[in-house]
Image (cartoon, rainbow, N blue to C red):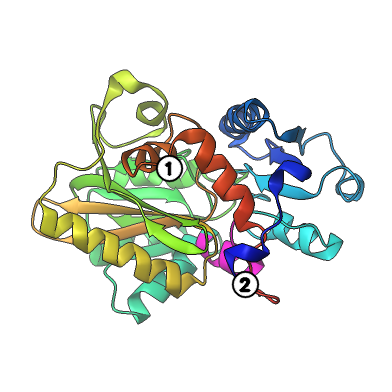
Amino acid sequence: MTAATVPDITTLRIGVLCAGNSPERPGSLSNGEQAAKALTHAGLTTDLIDLADTPLSSLRNRFDVALLGVHGLGGEDGKIQGALEIRGIPYTGSGVLASALGMHKPTFKKLLVQAGIETPAWIVIDPKTSVESTLSAVRYSLGFPAFVKPSSGGGSLAAGIAHDEAQLRTMIEATKDDPYCEYMVEEYVQGIPCTVGLIEVEGHLVTLPVHDVESKNEFYDYEAKHDPDLRVEHCPSVLPDTLTQNLQMLARRAFDLLGAHGVLRVDFLASFHHRTTVLEVNTLPGLSERGSLATMARAGGIPYPDLMQHLVRTAFTKPGYLP
């Protein structure tokens, strides 16, 4: 489908779907409010919808297109995408399959390995396996320190570094009855967190400038992501051109590998030992005006209000059938 088939979005009712009940609700709600405000100020008909108190059955007649600002479980994992597909409502972001693959980190990492793209080694914490067995597996396959995080989560919530077996034991025991359910342990790679955004503009996929971050905390955690005083950002990146060009190339490969649509953010670690690893992808990057996607877009010459409108238009450029 070409850009010429995209309807005039000034004639549409845009539903900004956000919040819901995942652990990432607060950030999603804030992002949705900012996106809705930008679209409204641009003269577009916009409705901010909190999925926590809105039944899916009521969505069909409430708006014409969905701008997805949901994060975490139930939002980025293909479930809301499937619900919108069934109801015939156009929506931003990737389809059901790419959303599910991108959200479940162990599965996406398997795709990376098969494609010859480097990603830190990992093991999934199996609740049916004893803690001692998991500790042994980490000791011999990953070593310490190791990084623990939810298999399906974002924003660095419930993530952290285990410096030794005692810390890892404590972290594993803390995952029991956790809303994320499944956790993974990943090889710890010391390096600079970098991200690359991709956004479709008028039918063409644009690779945005690289965004790198120096965290003042031990790693780029939830606190540092939400407190500007705890990080130093560079966009465009101050890393060497050869490295940033490689990151952008890998981001496009990840986009194609996943079968993503419209928008994607790919997160990397650029190691101090000349090693570049893909950490994960985000099929629904945050919509905040100060977030990394908007920061990269501004560096690429796309103002925030325009970015939100480009995102809305991508809902209409999906193929006739997208898994």
Residue 101 is inside the magenta segment? yes
Which stretch is magenta?
A: 93-102
Quadrant (top left/top right/bottom left/bottom right) for the N terminus: bottom right
- Of the pair 147 and 281, the residue shown nearer to us: 281
Q: Which residue is mark 2?
A: 1
**Residue 283 in sight from this viewpoint:** yes
Q: How many tags in the picture?
A: 2
Q: Is residue 27 above or below residue 90?
A: above
Mark 1 Cα shell of 10 Å, populated few (<14), some (14-19), many (≥20): many
Secondary element at tag 2? loop
Q: Is residue 223 above or below residue 177?
A: above
Residue 283 horizontal/vertical position (percent) = 52, 56
Residue under the point 20% across and 44% down: 192
Q: Which residue is mark 1?
A: 293
Residue under the point 18% across and 48% down: 190
Residue 223 horizontal/vertical position (percent) = 39, 26
Q: Is residue 89 above or below residue 156?
A: below
Q: Earlier in the sequence, mark 2 or mark 1?
A: 2
Residue 291 horizontal/vertical position (percent) = 43, 34
